[in-house]
Amino acid sequence: MLGNGQLSLEGIKILDLARLGPGPHCAQILGDFGADIIKVEEPGPGRGRRAGRVLRLAGSSPIRRNSRSIGLNLKSDEGREVFYKLAASADVIMEGFRPGVAKRLGIDYETIRALQPGIIYASLSGYGQDGPYAGYVGHDINYQGVAGILGLSGDPDGPPAIPGMATADDAGGISAALAILVAYVSKQRTGIGQYLDVSMVDTLITMMFLPIDQYISSGEVPHRGKTMLTGLYPWYNVYEAKDGKYLSVGAVEPWFYENLCRLLGREDFAPDQYAESERQAEIFEAFREIFRTKPRDEWVAELMPAETCVAPIYSLDEVVRDRHLQQRQMIVESEGPDKTMRKQVGFMVKFSETPGQIRRPGPELGQDTGELLAELGYDDRAIEAMEQAGAVASRNGEAAAEPVGGGQSEKGEER
C-alpha cells in the first residue's frame, strides 16, 4: 500500500460498465484516490462475436487496480434487477456502449434516474451521443485522424505517423474523470445529478486548441514540417546520436537556443534562430553532424543540466529504469494477485494530504460477485439460483451457464 493519508474520494461508489477505451483509465484514476469502483462485467469468457476477443483486458491488469468485479448478464431479468439494486446506492454510472445499446439493455440514464434521481451518468464513446458519426465504430487511430492529430504527425515527405500510444483512450479517460468530478462537485452544491456525454474526439479537439485556433485566425492550413511543433526549426527537433539512439531538442526561448549553440561549438548560429531557406538548412545539417559525434547519454549528461532543453528519447525499458521517474514514484512496486511484487505505473498527481493508494490488485472477472451480492442482501440460496440461471458469474470461478435466449450479443456494444 502506498501512502498513509486519507483518500479524497472515499465513500463515492462508481458502477463501471466501460470495459475498453477510456473507461479503464478513468476508473483507475478515481479508484486510486479512494472511489469504490465496481466493474459490472459480462460473466464467463464472452459469447458469440465477443468470444475470444483479443482486446479484453487481463483480469489482473494494473489498470484494473483498486476495483471489484461483479459478473452480471444484463440481458437477463435477474441480472438487471441486481444492477438496479447496485444503482440505487451508486453515485456514478459509467458506460462505454455504442449509443442506443444502454437503452436496449434497460440501463440507460432515464431508466436509472427514475430509480436514483441524483445519479451522475457518464456515457463514454468515440464520436459522442449525437452527430452524423455517433453510430459509427472506431478505435484510437480513427479518432486521432478525425481530430487532425495524425495529419500533423510524421515526416513531411511521408504518410501520417501512428503514435505509439492510445492517445484518445488515455486522454479520454482523464477527460471522463474530470467530467465526473466536476458533476460531483456540482451535485454537492445543487443536489442535482446529470448526464455526461464524453466523446474521445471532443477531448482530442480540445487538445488541438492551439493549432485549430491558429488556422481559424490566419486561414492558413498547417502542414507537417511547416510549423514549430512539426519540425520546421532545427532547435525544436529530434536528432540521432553516435550510438543510434535519439535526443529531443526543444530550445524555444532565445537564451536556451544560445546556450545550445555555444555548447555545440557553433555560437555563430545564435543570431539565426529563425533563419530561413539556405541558412536554416545549414544549421539543420550542422546539428545533425554534431550530434552524431557522441553517444546519446554523453550528450544528455552535458546538455540536459545546462539550460538547453535537451532530453533523451527513451525506449520503454529505459523509461521504467529512469532514476527521476523512480524518485517521483511514477514507477512503483505493489503486491499482485499472486502475492508477488510487480512494477506498475504510479499516480498522475501527488497530493500532500490525501495521496493515492494501491489498495488491491486488479480483480479477475466476476471475482467479487458473491461479496457484492451479499452486500445487497442476497443469501446463498438466491445467489446459487442466479448462478444456475446464468444471471451472475459463478463464485467457484467457472463460467456461468448460458442463459435461455443467448448471452451478450448486442451489435457493436463497445464504443
Image (tube, rainbow, N blue to C red):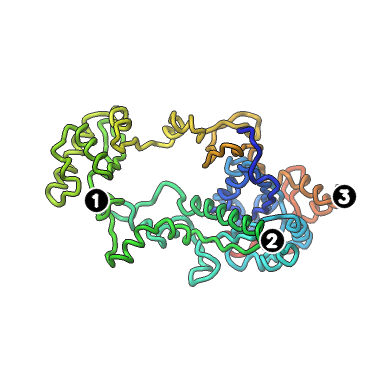
Residue 262 picture quarter: top left
Above or below 44: residue 96: below
Query: Would you say 113 lies left or right of 302 here?
Result: right
Residue drawn at (16%, 49%), measured in percent from left and top?
275
Q: Which mark is residue 191?
A: 2
Query: How crowded is the residue under tag 2: few (<14 C-alpha within 10 Å), some, or many (20+)?
Result: few
- Image location of residue 34, percent across then percent down: 65, 43
Identify the mark nearer the N-term, 1 or 2. Answer: 2
Q: Residues within 10 Å of mark 3 (few under 14, many from 20)?
A: few
The residue labelled by disc 3 is 381
Q: Are marks 3 and 1 in contact (CB under 8 Å)?
A: no
The foreground one among 374 and 72 is 374
Amino acid type assigned to the residue bearing label 2 in the image: Gly
Q: Mark 3 to mark 1: distance in Å?
A: 69 Å
Q: Crowding at label 1, few (<14), some or many (≥20) Cα neighbours within 10 Å?
A: some
Label 2 near label 1: C-beta < 8 Å? no
Quadrant assignment for the N terminus? top right
Task: Give the residue drawn at x 64%, y 32%.
Answer: 4
> Residue 79 at what x, y percent from top left?
75, 58
Foreground pick, 383 / 333: 333
Q: Secondary structure at mark 2?
A: loop
Which is more foreground, mark 3 or mark 1? Answer: 1
Q: In the image, is residue 192 above or below residue 334?
A: below
**Who comes first in sequence, dot 3 or dot 1?**
1
Q: CA distance from mark 1 to mark 2?
A: 52 Å
Name the residue carrying label 1.
232
Nearest-to-viewer mark from 2 and 3:
2
Q: Residue furthest bottom?
A: 132
Q: Residue furthest front?
A: 189
> Which is closer to the viewer, label 1 or label 2?
2
